[in-house]
Image (tube, rainbow, N blue to C red):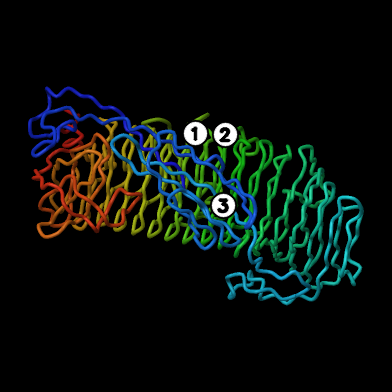
Amino acid sequence: MRKLVVFLTVLAFAATACEQDDYPFWSDGPGGDMPGGQQGVTNLKDPALAWNADSFEASIGGQNSFPTLTNTFNVNVSYESSRPEVATVNANGVVTLLSGGSTLITASSAADETYSASSDSYLLTVIGGASGEADDDSLVFASTGDPSSEDDISNTNFKGRITVTFSETGDAAVTGDTYGYVTVDGNKVTVNNTGGQVLIYELKGTTANGYFKVYGAKKQAIVLNGVSITNPDGAALNNQNKKRTFVVVKGTNTLSDGASASYTKEGDEDQKAVLFSEAQLIFSGSGLLTVNALNAQEKSGIASDDYIRILENPTIKINAGSSAGHGLKGKDYVQLSNGSLVVSTSAPMKKGISTDDYVLVEGGTHMVSVSGGVAYDEEDAEYSGSAGVKADNYFAMTGGSLTIKNSGNGGKGINAGSYDFDEENHTVADSYISGGTLTISTTGREVNDVSAKGIKIGWVTKNGSGEHAKVTGNAGNLLVSGGKIIVNSSGGEGLEVKGNLTFDGGETHVTSGSDDAINCQGDLTVNNGFVYAFSSENDAMDSNGDTKLNGGYVMAICTKGTPEVAIDANTEDGKKLYINSGATVVAYGGLESGYSASQTVYSMSGTAGAWNALYDGKSFIAAFKAPSGISTFIVSAPSLSSGYKSVSVSGEGKCNGAWATSGISGGTSVTLSNYTGGNGGPGGGGPGGWW
C-alpha cells in the first residue's frame, strides 16, 4: 500500500453575496456547531509515514535488521501483514517470521482534524522454511497452482536432468550430460539439445564471468538452485529455445550483467535482457531470484518474446538501472498468478512491467517502483514517460495485491490501451478490476506535454488544441466490479478512462492534487460499490458523456471553486448528470447545472473531520467521513429523511475509510433542506457562479 495524502486548499469567499439559505461552506447551517462562524477548508498536515526501504529480505533464524518507519509527528500507527502465514506483525511493529515466501508489511494512520491519512508498505521476503522442492534428481514436480493448464510444470514428463555448477576458481562442472549436449568455456556454458529430449537443467554455484545459454526444440525446465551468475558482456541466462520454459526458483539466486555490457548480437539471435527467452517463461518454486540490469544499452531485467507467467510461489526482484530497459517485458502478455514480483526501474520512459498485449494480476503480492522521467522516443518521434505497468491492450486484476509508486515526471501508475494496438487489431479490449488490492501513487508533474496520471486507460485523438479541440476517435473502457483501488496522483489526474467508466462493485478511492480525480471521455456510470473522489484543483468526478449515478455509494469532494464542481457531465454537448433512485450520494463543491434527479437532493450540515450519517427514519443508510474543514454537503439517498452529525462507527470502514454501512450509532440529528443549486449549494454557489 502507499502513502495517501489528501490535499485540501484554503478557500475563502465573501459572504455578502451569499443567499441566507444557501448555507455556505464555512457555516454549519441549521443545528451546526458554529452557526455563522468561519469554517474554511484547512490544509491537513501530512504525517509522511515512510519505511526506509521498499523491500527487504529476512532469514528464518538469522540476525535481521528490519526496515524502520519514519513517524515524525508520532501519529497513532497500525500495522498489517498481507500474508500472516509468512510473517506476522504486532501492534508495536515487531515482525515474526514463520515460513518462506513474501508478504506486504503496511503501516497506516487514520485522518483526524490535524493530519491526513497516510500509509506506506514494504515487501518482506522470508528465506528459509520448506523449499517446496527436494534437492534430488527427481524428474517429477508438484503442481504449481494451475493443474488444468500446460503452464503447470506437473503436467510435463521430463526425461533427464543435467546439473551445471559454476565456479569462482575454475571451470563450471557438469553432471548428467549423457547426451553430450553441454559445452563449457570457463564458466560460459552452452547447451545444444539436438536430440529433442524434454530435460531439466539445474544451475548451482557462483561465477563473476560467465553465462548459461540453451538451444532446443522441446519444452524444458531451468532450476535455479542457489546460483549466482554475472555476465559483464550481456545476458546471464539466454534461452534460445522457442518452446515453453519453466524456471523453478529454489534458495537464493542472482543474475546480473555489467555496466559496460555491450549485448553484442550473435547472428540473428536476440539478447534483450539479463534473463532473456525466445519462449514462454513460467516461474515457480519458493526461492528468491534477484536480477540486476546494470547495462547502458536499454536492456531489460527479464524479457520474453512470448508471454511471462508467475505461478506459486517464488519471489522475483528486478533492479533496472538508469540506462537500462524495462524491468519485466513479456511480448505477448504478463500474467501474475501467484508469488511476488518486486520491480525497480530508474531509466527515463521505461516501464516496470511492459507488454505488447495485456497484463493480468490474479494473485500474489507485487510491488513496482519507477522513478524515470520523460525522454524523447526516437522510434515514435515523440516524448514519452515512464509507467509502473504498460499494457498495449488492456489491464485486468482479479486477485492478489499490486502496489505501484511512480515518482518520475510524466509518469503513470498504469497505462493500458494504445492507439497503435487498436489500429493494428481494430479493437482495444475492456480493462477490468474484479478483485484484489491495487494501490497507486504518482508524484511527478507534466513535462513536454506528457502528463502524470495514476491510471490511464485507452487512447483519444483530437482535432485542434485546448478548449476548442474536438475528439475524433477514442477507445478503452474500464469496468470495476470488485476489489479495492486506492489512487493518489499529486501532479495529474487520478483515474482517467478514454472510453466508458463503469462501477458495478468494489471500493475505489481516488485523490488528485492538480486535476480531476476521476475522468472519462465517455459515460461515467455507478451501479454499485463504493466510490470516493477528491480533487483540490479540478472536478472530483467528470465525464465528457453522461454521468449516471444509479446505485452504490458515491462521495465526491471538489475544493477548487467555480467553474469546477464535485460531479460533472458534458452539458455543452447535451449530456447530463443523473442521480437515479438507488444511489447514495454525498458531494461538496456543487453539481453540474441542469442535473436530473429521480430522488430528492438535499443540503445537509454535519461535522467537519468526523463521521456523519444518512438516516431513512428507521435505520442508518450509511456513514461518511467528512474531510477536515468541510461541514456542509449535498446529499441524496433512497428514503432519506434526515442526517446525523458526529456519529460513531464501529463497523468496517469501506473505500479506504470514507464510507461505512454497519456499526453506526449515536450522533445528533440534523434537518435536511432541499438543494436547489446547479453548480451551487453547499460548497458551491448560485447557478453560473459561486455566489
The one nearer the camera, 462 or 32, is 32
Badge 1 vs badge 2, beta-carbon distance below 8 Å: yes
Residue 280 makes an appearance in the image: yes
Q: Indicate the position of residue 546 as horizontal and vertical percent values.
A: 29, 48
Residue 416 versus residue 350 in the image, above or below: below
Name the amino acid type tagged 2.
Gly
Badge 1 vs badge 3, beta-carbon distance below 8 Å: no
Are there few (<14), some (14-19), or many (20+) residues within 10 Å of tag 2? many
Q: Indicate the position of residue 368 as horizontal and vertical percent values.
A: 56, 47
Helix or strand or loop: what does disc 2 sit on? loop
Badge 3 vs badge 2, beta-carbon distance below 8 Å: no
**Upstream in the sequence, badge 3 or badge 2?**
3
Q: In this view, does 119 lie to the left or right of 231?
A: left
**Upstream in the sequence, badge 1 or badge 2?**
2
Residue 160 versus residue 643 in the image, above or below: below
Of labels 1 and 3, the one closer to you: 3
- How far apart are labels 1 and 2 at the CA level? 8 Å
Name the amino acid type tagged 1.
Gly
- Quickly name the residue at label 2: 373
- Quickly name the residue at label 3: 124
The label on residue 621 is none
**Upstream in the sequence, badge 1 or badge 3?**
3
The label on residue 444 is 1
Question: Residue 536 falls in which quadrant of the image?
Answer: top left
Q: Indicate the position of residue 67 as horizontal and vertical percent values.
A: 55, 44
Name the amino acid type tagged 3.
Leu
Helix or strand or loop: what does disc 3 sit on? strand
